[in-house]
Amino acid sequence: MCIIMLIHFVSTTIESLVVSEYTYQYVSENLQGNDSHVHLKSVDASSNENCSAHKTEAQHDSAEWNSYYVYVEYVPCLLVVVWAGIMSDYLGRKPFIILTLLGTFLKTLATLTVVQYSLDIKYIFVGCLLGGLTGSHYTLDLSFCGVVADVSDYDKSRTFTLALLHLYSGLGSAVAQMSTGYMIRDLGFAIPCLVSVSLCFLNFLVGLYIPESLSNTNRKPNNDGFCEKLQRFFAFYTNSSNLREGKVWQFVLCLLSLTLVTSPLTTRMNIDIMYLLGQPFCFTSEQIGWFNSANNLVSLCVSVLVLKLLHLCMNDEIITVLSCVSGIVCFAVEGFASVWWMLYVGKYDTCSYSFGYIFVAQ
């Protein structure tokens, strides 16, 4: 499971960086009146006039395109996540892990086709739709959380297990961020994307051989029709004892909290790239890679050690509140940054922000 998480985040981070920087370069070329996109090789702000000329418009248009990518992928993804949440108790976790890994492979393959042939950025929607229809990374997270729940007890050990899972995702993202910047600078967009496709295919093969964590005895009976399964899914909200004991409202509040915690992180990396490519920072591809890898190492790796220390004197609820305060400070510092070192200060404040997702998800 940890190997799958590591490879998944390496491959998807590479693909996401390629899409963001390819989109920015494509938009910048269009704004300069260059209709030939054969030369879309890399983003190098140190030798590129895009950082000064057309910078504001290029940032705006690129961010707008990135938001469209998110809508196309995550709107159908919501339906798949609900379906996976219902059916994973009947079919097990493994089918949905394999489904997501297959969808990720198809998405990266579609992106490779776009950058290899320097196609219009509207064709990136094909990959986004493929990723959304197979659940994106949210279904993978859901399945892995189910696996952790299947093999662990409900105590602090489960929290730490989830944190370790995010540690591997942080390591994968950091490695990908660090290397992709140099690959884009020296090799263009196609080679990093080819690496991403290869890793996704390898991950899919690994997923075929993982064991199922939910035993047949613990699965719900699969003789119900879809309507009955849907009714069972919503029975929690209509059960009189759950309403009387406040469990329904507690769950709704946790769901709202989870939404508020994850919303700033959903498109954060893509928007950050647009922010860093323009004035006053004018980061190059490799500088973006170092910056984002430092962020991942701190927020998802160092934070695991901090979590272990905080568990000695605090409960999960207090740590969750502190993590949200940390996130507020982080976003404020980065939003008002005028020099590069302020960006790093803001990123270091994210050290405990990822705790909120872990605790509320649990």
Image (cartoon, rainbow, N blue to C red):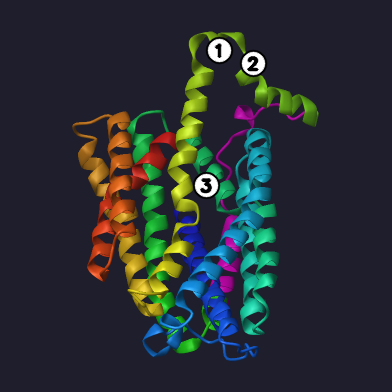
Q: Are marks 1 and 2 in contact (CB under 8 Å)?
A: yes
Asked if residue 90 lies left or right of residue 301, the reply is: right
Looking at the image, residue 328 sits to the left or right of residue 99; the answer is left
Looking at this view, is 146 or 320 the one in front?
320
Q: Which amino acid is tagged 2? A: Thr
Q: Can residue 148 be seen by looking at this rendering?
A: no
Task: Choose the circle earlier in sequence order: 3 or 1.
Answer: 3
Q: Which residue has dot 2 on it? A: 238
- Give 21 or 149, whichever is nearer the viewer: 21
Residue type, label 1: Leu
Q: Alpha carbon of mark 2 to alpha carbon of mark 3: how far?
A: 27 Å
Query: Residue at 35% across / 60% down in the picture?
Result: 296
Percent x, y for residue 121?
64, 74
Q: Are marks 2 and 3 in contact (CB under 8 Å)?
A: no
- Give the percent coordinates (x, y) of residue 288: 37, 73
Magenta residue span: 194-223
Q: Which mark is residue 141?
A: 3
x, y (%) of residue 312? 20, 34
